[in-house]
Image: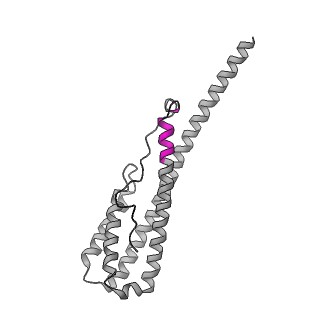
Amino acid sequence: MNWFVWLIGIAAAIILWIIAMFNKGVRLQQTVRESRANIDVQLKRRHELIPQLVAVVKGYATHEQGIFTAVAEARTKATQSLSDLKSGYEEESELVHAVNRMMMVVEAYPQVKADQQFIVLQKELTNTEDRIAASRRFYNANCRAWNVFREAFPTSMLVSGPPAYYFEVEGLDVAPHV
């Protein structure tokens, strides 16, 4: 009789552990989704700021049309790519490079750098880049936690789900030079 109570206790402990690990996996997946959404919010904010910045610069540097076209095309691609869970961020690299080229053009126009609207937009873009970097670190940490949880033994036998893809895009370690 005593061994039967022990057997029931051990079985109950195993079942409770399985439930706890399954629930932890669900929480980790939701945290990854939430942190990705936070990045997307910041990227959308960047996408909304860039046309305003381009408009101010365009007013002073009218003969730099190629740069403005490149920024607009890169922004369009980046905006459209946010829906892809696996890659979704590759176009951001192109956008960052295009904005960096535009900011280099600004260096040749001191009147742009003195424009109050440009200064405000420049600060907003810098703040947004900082938020993107913080969101990216948070997201990648959550991806790591989920991927380790789903691949480590014995939880790998209990949970299923796709791996979380890190936000790793070449050139995004360096924010636009503003």
Residue name at image x 56 percent, y 35 percent: 22
Is residue 150 shown above or below 142? Answer: above
Classify 138 as above or below 3: below
Could you say which is closer to the camera, residue 97 or residue 162? 97
Q: Position of residue 115 (x, y in %)?
A: 42, 86
Report the number of numbered marks: 0
For the question of whether residue 126 can be seen, the reply is: yes
Residue ranking furthest to the top? 1
Assess whether residue 144 is covered by the magenta stretch.
yes
Colouring method of the image? one colour
Residue lying at the far right of the rendered structure: 2
What are the residue bounds of the magenta stretch? 143-155
Which one is nearer the viewer's eye here, 25 or 103? 103
Residue at (71% x, 13% y) in the render: 3
Is residue 77 at all visible to an observer of this figure?
A: no
Q: Give x and y (percent) for residue 48.
A: 42, 70
- Taking the spot 49% from the left edge, 70% from the top edge, the residue there is 127
Quarter of the C terminus within the rendering: bottom left
Q: Is residue 32 above or below residue 121?
A: above
Percent position of residue 61, x then y? 30, 84
Q: Is residue 143 left or right of residue 66?
A: right
Quadrant occupied by the N terminus: top right
Query: Chief secondary structure of the magenta span?
Result: helix
Q: Where in the figure is residue 164, as x and y percent of width and height?
A: 44, 45
Is 88 covered by the magenta stretch? Answer: no
Residue at 40%, 61% (x, y): give it: 173
